[in-house]
Image (tube, rainbow, N blue to C red):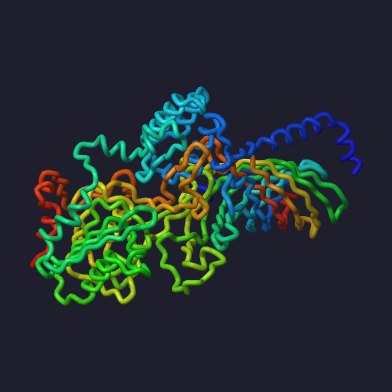
Amino acid sequence: MNSIYLFLYKNMFQLVLGIFVISTVSSCRKELPQINQPERYITGNFSEAFEAYWNGMNNNYIFWDIDPTNWDDVYKKYKPLFAQLNINDSTDVRKSYTYFKEMTSKLVDSHYALQINSGYVKDSATYISPSDLRHQKQPGYHGNINPNFFYSTIPPKYLDPGYVKGFFNFADGSQFFAISGKIKNNILYLHFNSFKLNTVFNAATPNNAQKVLKYYFDQLKTTPNLKGLILDVRSNGGGALADLDLLVGSLTDKAYVIGATRAKGGMGRLDYTPWIPASVHPAKDAKTFTAPIVVLADLNSVSMAEMTTMALKALPANNATFVGERTWGGNGPLYGNDDVFNGGQFTTSFLKLVYTSTLMMRYKDGKIYEGIGFPPDIEVKYNKAALDAGTDPQLEKAISLIPQ
Amino acid sequence: MKKKCLLFLLCIIAGTLTLHAQWSVGLEAGYNKNYIFTNTGFRAFTSYKPLEGFNIGIPVKYTLNNWFGIQADPQFIRKSYKMERSGYFEGIYQKNTNSYIQLPLMAHFTFGGEKIKGFFNLGGYAGYWTASHIKGTQLDAFSQSYDLPDDFQAKRALDFEPGYNYDEKYDFDKRKDRRIELGLLAGAGVSYQLKSRYELFAEGRYYRALTDQQKNYMLNQIPRYNDTFIVQVGCMYRLGK
């Protein structure tokens, strides 16, 4: 024991130095940054508005794994630019709109939209949608097919007498409409403009749109010699994910996998949960539909319309053909509350909504079609002249693919 | 990669193990609890929790005199943690089981009597994160809801629909995961001279990682450091005359 005391005494300086070095090295950890919820920032100036938005994106955006945007460079470039702006100056607020547009221009999320919460930009734009801007620059871009074409032109020209059509007005001002009927007496056709199928189908108040859906599902079950099915999701902006099991689940008697999704697994840009299989489950009493199915989709088929197209293509019977155009490319599911999957859309004081996908989706072939769009098996481009003349080359192609 | 790690380990042992009177070699095994030093930022109903693990090693000691020596413990160690959600999201979690091969190198100070001695260790370590396994339950956006009455009131999200359970290997992401870990260690314990050449010991040790588990790949990154507390027992065999 004495030798220890002697050693300590003789090496006092070295020991003190050693303790100093150890304590210095042991404190060599990076500090944990304080990261605030974007909703909590008091946006009294543009520096705060930028920080709130940038951090929200840094931690909530789901596509950093595949996105070409360098978000750190965005911070370095735009932080000083926003610091020069005055949030109470209308010219500066409009300038910020331009900055937001530039910052987000390459974001791969094709649901993505920013809504600025300021009266100064109301007249110039209500929201910024990078995918909208990208698509508009592409050759062959077109808007939605006129709803009247589906509702008034297609039925008398292509459907047998006895078709049904109807619409349902929702309290939020949106309208759902659907058309169903037979072609050549043995091909069942269905078109609807948005995925609110469960809501309409199970509505307590009977309505004409509900009659259309009931007609479609009844015919699917009871028509003995159906030669084929045409599901038309062109210019369909998407909607409820739960509709997948109702619509596609009515065509299979077994659950099957169409791809996989993953969510944020932490605050880091590359923190993800594992890929979770995305499955379609059979609807009640559903039987496997083995006749040919043609799904019609176009550039303006977004979100659930794309997922439905993918789900039909992934049917175990392998009996679906996709006719039309490459879809929009926004197929990551969305939730309104970012607490559910620890990521996705958020708000700041300056931004009424940062609308962004909650989950990343990949198709069963292992590819992620976000920002790219799902490609058709048989491409038939939008033809304005033909539509104006009352004909539908895409539908005609679909009909031709179903042998009689 | 596993073969390379094993070869590395054997080289360390072979390189340090020369037949000399003052060399000792042994076997040690222990239980540990690993805490991840990080935070969850603004994530609500989310927290990180410590998890238990184990370690097994081959301590090699070079004793300079009756109170001081140098020790290296090439070892395999599990440093695991859990991320879990609470409240309405109760039942959603992920356990990260992380395996490391590491080489602690330490100054070994001994005091006390002939048979029973006390000791403490001070030093550092370098480790390599060889593998990771994840097990958990997550919400599944595509799952089929349970058949529930209209007036059913759920206490948690998983009452509505089944979650997705998984138990799989984690694939490292080169852009994010830092697999080399460096840190400090401090330990204290007692040893018992069983026979002239055999010594039993029990030790409590703390490993403090100084390197983040993630590379610096983003601004405002929240670091993650391992803090590992171990309790281990072992036996040393004195080589030479």
- Report whether A349 appears left or right of A223: right
Report the front residue among A304 and A272: A304
Q: Image quarter for residue A97?
A: top left
Q: Where is residue A192 in the image (x, y as percent from the top left)?
A: 26, 59
Q: Image quarter for residue A219?
A: bottom left
Is residue B226 depicted above or below B33 in this figure?
above
Q: Where is residue A325 in the image (x, y as percent from the top left)?
A: 20, 48
Residue positioned 76% across, 32% down in the render:
A20
- Report whether A215 appears left or right of A388: right
Residue positioned 45% across, 42% down in the render:
A354
The answer to whether residue A264 is visible is yes
The answer to whether residue A319 is visible is no
- Report whether A228 appears left or right of A13: left
Residue positioned 39% across, 54% down in the render:
A172
Q: Image quarter for residue A107?
A: top left
- Report whether B93 appears left or right of A324: right
Q: Where is residue A26 in the image (x, y as percent from the top left)?
A: 70, 38
Report the front residue among B16 and A404: A404
Report the front residue among A303 and A253: A303
